Image (cartoon, rainbow, N blue to C red):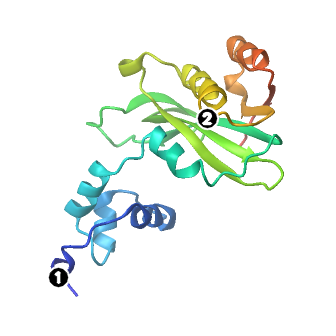
Amino acid sequence: MSKSKYSGLKPTRRDYCQFILLTLINYTQTYMAEHHPFFSHDAINRYLMEDDVSPEAVWLAVKDTIRYTENACLIFDDTVLDKRHSFHIELVRRQYSGNEHGIIKGIGVVNCLYANLDTGEHWIVDWRVYNPDADGKSKLDHMRDMFDDALEHKQLPFHSVLMDSWYAAKEVMLHIDRAGKILALWELEW
């Protein structure tokens, strides 16, 4: 069957997420189109341009599925999406990648997870793109913003905060302590 016969079909978030989870080689929309029986590159591109995966949309999607408990923690971590071969993506900047143990070109993302320690389940509840040229914020600023939002707006019950040891700046530790939360740090070695 040709893709043109199914030109009316549109990719969904589920289609795209399944592709991201299953592919081991290439995460581009071109690769998805080449290996999907129904969706063209243009259809996938239109879907990605129209889908709302903003931090607010993520929160709205997960807030009713979370199993809230006082025996929970917030987990903050950052990742650098490797874009070393990209030359025209505006969010790409040179930054440290823990996976690479060095500086690479990439897009930095700071994530906030809510972890229920009774059940072992966790949910992404917030995320931010590291783009200091646009918003003037460091990764630590984003972490503090998400922490404050979890307390004030989302009103998540939790007793502790887990984060990579590089976040252990004095102002961050004092901020968490003033909120009455316990801080735990880790150092991951890969």
Q: Position of residue 148 (x, y in %)?
A: 62, 24
Q: Position of residue 20 (x, y in %)?
A: 46, 61
Q: For label 2, count other residues whose C-alpha is less than 10 Å away and answer few (under 14), some (14-19) or many (20+).
A: some
Give me the residue at 41% from left, 26% from top: 131
Horizontally, residue 161 falls left or right of residue 4, namely right
Query: Looking at the rendered structure, which numbered label has been put on residue 154?
Result: 2
Horizontally, residue 29 falls left or right of residue 110, namely left
Judging by the rendered image, the residue that carries numbered circle 1 is 5
Is residue 181 at least partly visible in the picture?
yes
Q: For label 1, count other residues whose C-alpha is less than 10 Å away and answer few (under 14), some (14-19) or many (20+).
A: few
Establish if 40 lies above or below 159: below
Question: Disc 2 on helix, strand or loop?
Answer: loop
Establish if 111 lies above or below 9: above
Give me the residue at 84% from left, 52% from top: 118
| Sequence-earlier tag: 1 or 2 | 1
Q: Closer to us: mark 1 or mark 2?
A: 2
Q: Position of residue 26 (x, y in %)?
A: 40, 60
Question: Disc 1 on helix, strand or loop?
Answer: helix
In front of the other: 66 or 136: 66
In what quadrant of the picture does the C terminus appear?
top right
Please, what is the three-letter code of the amino acid marked with disc 2?
Answer: Lys
Q: Residue furthest left?
A: 4
Please, what is the three-letter code of the amino acid marked with disc 1?
Answer: Lys
Give me the residue at 63% from left, 49% from top: 123
Give me the C-alpha separation between circle 1 and circle 2. Answer: 45 Å
Q: Position of residue 134 (x, y in %)?
A: 36, 21
Establish if 57 lies above or below 159: below
Horizontally, residue 41 falls left or right of residue 93, namely left
